[in-house]
Every structure is written in C-alpha cells, then in structure tokens.
Amino acid sequence: MSPTLPGVRVRFEQHEVAVHSDAPEILASLRDSFAHMIGTGAGEPVARIEVTRTGATYRGQGPGGAFSGDGTREAVLRWARYQAIEQLIIARPDLLWLHGAVAGWRGRALVMPGTRGRGKSTLVTRVCARGWSFLTDDILPADPATLRVLPFPQVPAVRPDPGRDLPEAWLRETAKSEVRVDDWVASGPLPVGAIMLPEARRSGSVELRPCSSAEAVLELARGCWNFAEHGERAVAVLARLVAGRPTFRLGFRDAEQAADLIARWAETTWPPEG
C-alpha cells in the first residue's frame, strides 16, 4: 500500500476507508458514487485500498485480497466500491447490516428489503422525488439498541428494466444509471414505520397487499450481511423491528404508479409530526 498516492476517504459515522490510486478517473468515479459519504481525512482509516493502472489495465489490493477481475475500469470500480463498503460493515459489528432500500417521511422510515432485481432502487428514488428523504437504496444499517435505521447514502444506481430476470453474471452488468439525491439525503437515523416488500414484475397493475410479520422478518434475515455474527440475536432484533408495524407486499410494473400509491398510503396512515 502506498498512502502517498492521491486518495479519497469514504465515511460512515466516525469510520473512514481510504482508497488510493494513481488513476484520477477511479478517484473521480468513487467521489461521485460516495458523494454524500466523503470523509475528512482526519485520523487513521479503518482500512486502505489501492488501485493502480498500467496502460489500460487496472490492479487492486485491499484487506480482502487482490482484485481478480478482468482488469477493466468498470470491474475494478465495482471491486473498490464493494471493498470500501465491506470494510465499513466490518468496522461496525454492533449493527445489523441488511439488504434494502429506505426512504423517510414524517419522521418514519419505510423499509423495502429484497434481493436484486426487485425494483428497490427505482422505488426509493421515485418516492424521494415526491418529497421523501433518502437513507439508502441497497446497504441498510440497523441499530439493534434503538431499532432505528441509519443513512448509508451511496448514490443509487437504477436499472432500466426492474423485474427482469437477472443474468448469473449480474456483477458484470453495466446498464445502470446513477440518480442524484443531493436534496433528498436524510439528516439522521429514523425509526421504522413500515416494511414493504417490493415485487417488480413484467405485467399487471400496482397492488399493495398485507403480508405477515414472519414473511417480513424472513426477507430481512435473508439479506442480512452479518447474520452469522449475530446468530439468534439477529432474529430477535428483526422480530422487534417488525413487531407492531404495517407489513406489505407491493407488486408493480409501473414505478410511478407504485410511488404514487406509497405516497397516498403514507399520507393517510402517518400523521404529521408534532
């Protein structure tokens, strides 16, 4: 590792990961992706990642080992982003790290868990365009002590065709566009107000239907990054997080119609603060 190379810091709470590179385009892309998570550079980072370029070939080295991709810019960028996120997750083992999108409204968080291709990123950006706050579109940190979700505002990347079956080599897929969330980022953690399981599909109208708390817990647990470290405690925390809160499945083909339905539901269900 060569900390004398130019770098960028990616920050979550008080922890920072340093990414150093002799390739300005790599640092610029990371600054764009983590525009709302850029660290100050003060203090020792929890981890260092290095990306170097020789001609058109990129190489990487991080705490998890060396980059083993095809040497293209796109591949090394995906690797560097994942490495940075992984090290931030490792730095906060007290949190439950889940796979889901979160938007805030009237002091509450709408949690949308699910695997890739469900339309989470599409939905969260659509509801935020209607005045909601943005917490995350993918990496969901939940505090077991407070049952609040914390912002992890990596710039969301939206697939043009949610609901389509994902290829096995989804990591090599590049047909995504980033959505700027500059005016939407939440200022702090929020308590969970509802859990909504999105189901992007190829046909049919938008449909919001109740599901059981057990289904919601199972979906959250399925996407828990550090489930093994928390074990039975993770299940107990997720059960508490879901308990007493509305749980739904949202089937949709048209994301705009789905976002309208979510906004109407929240408007009538969640009273204004104060």
Image (spheres, grey):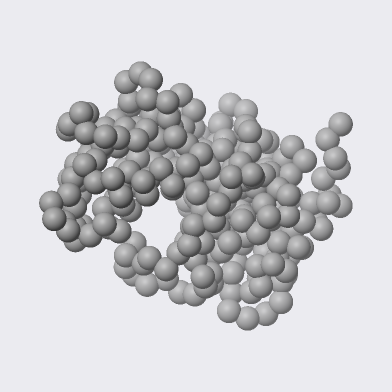
Q: Quadrant of residue 20?
A: top left
Position of 57 with respect to 144 (left or right) is left
Q: Quadrant of residue 72?
A: bottom left
Q: Quadrant of residue 3?
A: top left
| Residue 156 position in % (x across, y down) | 51, 53
Q: Residue at x 34, y 62 (%)?
A: 171
Q: Residue at x 51, y 39 (%)?
A: 36
| Residue 199 position in % (x across, y down) | 60, 67
| Between 38 and 243, the one nearer to me in the picture | 38
Say if 127 sits above or below 152 in the image.
below
Let me know if residue 120 appears in the view: yes
| Between 151 and 91, the one nearer to me in the picture | 151
Let me know if residue 93 appears in the view: no
Q: Residue at x 18, y 45 (%)?
A: 52
Q: Residue at x 52, y 73 (%)?
A: 161
In the picture as drawn, the residue positioned furthest to the left comes out as: 54
Q: On the rendered image, what quadrant is the C terminus found in? A: top right
In the picture as drawn, the residue positioned furthest to the front comes out as: 24
| Residue 15 position in % (x across, y down) | 41, 26
